[in-house]
Image (spheres, rainbow, N blue to C red):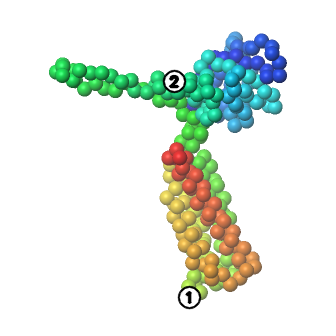
Amino acid sequence: MNTQISGAVRMASDTAQSVMVKIHLAEETITLAAANGVEIGTWPLEEVGIASKPDGFHLRIEGEEIILTTDDDARFAVALGITTPTSRLARMMAKLRDETADASVVVDLTDPAVGPVPPPEVEPLPPTRRQSRMADGLPYLGPLVIAAAVIAFLASVVAATGGSAISFAADIPAWPAMMAASLVLAAGGFTAFQDPHHGRASIGAGIAIGLIVILFTAGRLIDTGLVGEALLTFTLAVVASGVLLAVDTAGRNDL
């Protein structure tokens, strides 16, 4: 997102004359500059409260409320991904979308001189803030999964001290499988940290191994002390990894 719009700004607490400004919307920030080019300030969008009201856009910045009016309210609202516009702004946004839609073309197909008519090129609407931030999935998937894998590994070390307290059928200790799940999760998280387009398959495999351990050992636990808490901690780490992977997948598919 990189949008330049002109507008005027005034404090909500008084009725003083508005000041003309230039508005620059970047990926994560909004910048206001005076008409002569002097920058007033730059603020992260996540720290700016924005509400659409009949008299303009109300922005809460550093505890102060200002009122911003622009020469293109619809483009400003679409760029910010405002979902609760006023009735007037909603009509303007709908008109903006209609203008970017494919124009209908009437062609006399009986004229042999007329060949296939290519569709007009349409400039896509700027992505919303959420679409821009989630285009490659969850931004911190790798580090978060690595943290969960470390917790799961420590839980498996505690489980190892209990021998077969956490076990599969025939008293086969489950801690080697717990360690394997932790290491696979860590490998997937490290890969995702280095390249957001990779590592999800390994994370999914680690989650699958962890769920198998949980499924086949939860009912056979014979120690409710520290070892039992280790199994609970391992379960929480695996489930948390699954939730992170689901959020990442939803972001990549714009759900």
Write down the quadrant of residue 89 in the picture: top right
Direction from residue 122 to residue 22 in the image, left or right: right
Can residue 154 be seen here? The reply is: no
- Give the answer, above or below, for where 200 lies relative to 233: above
Horizontal and vertical percent for residue 229?
A: 72, 73
Which residue is the extreme one toward the front?
87
Q: Earlier in the sequence, mark 2 or mark 1?
A: 2
Residue lying furthest left? 112
Query: Quadrant location of residue 172?
Result: bottom right
Q: Provide the residue designation for mark 1.
A: 170
Q: Residue at x 73, y 28 (%)?
A: 59
- Toward the bottom, the furthest residue is 170
Q: Callout 2, which amino acid?
A: Lys
The N terminus sits in image quarter? top right
Circle 2 — which element? helix
- Give the residue pinned by disc 2: 95
Q: CA distance from mark 2 to mark 1?
A: 69 Å
Is 235 situated above or below 29?
Answer: below
Q: Is residue 65 visible?
A: yes
Give the side of residue 128 with respect to residue 57, left or right: left
Q: Residue at x 56, y 88 (%)?
A: 170
Task: Characterize the local packing of mark 1: few (<14), some (14-19) or many (20 or more) Cα atoms within 10 angstroms.
Answer: few
Q: Nearer the viewer, residue 61 or 181?
A: 61
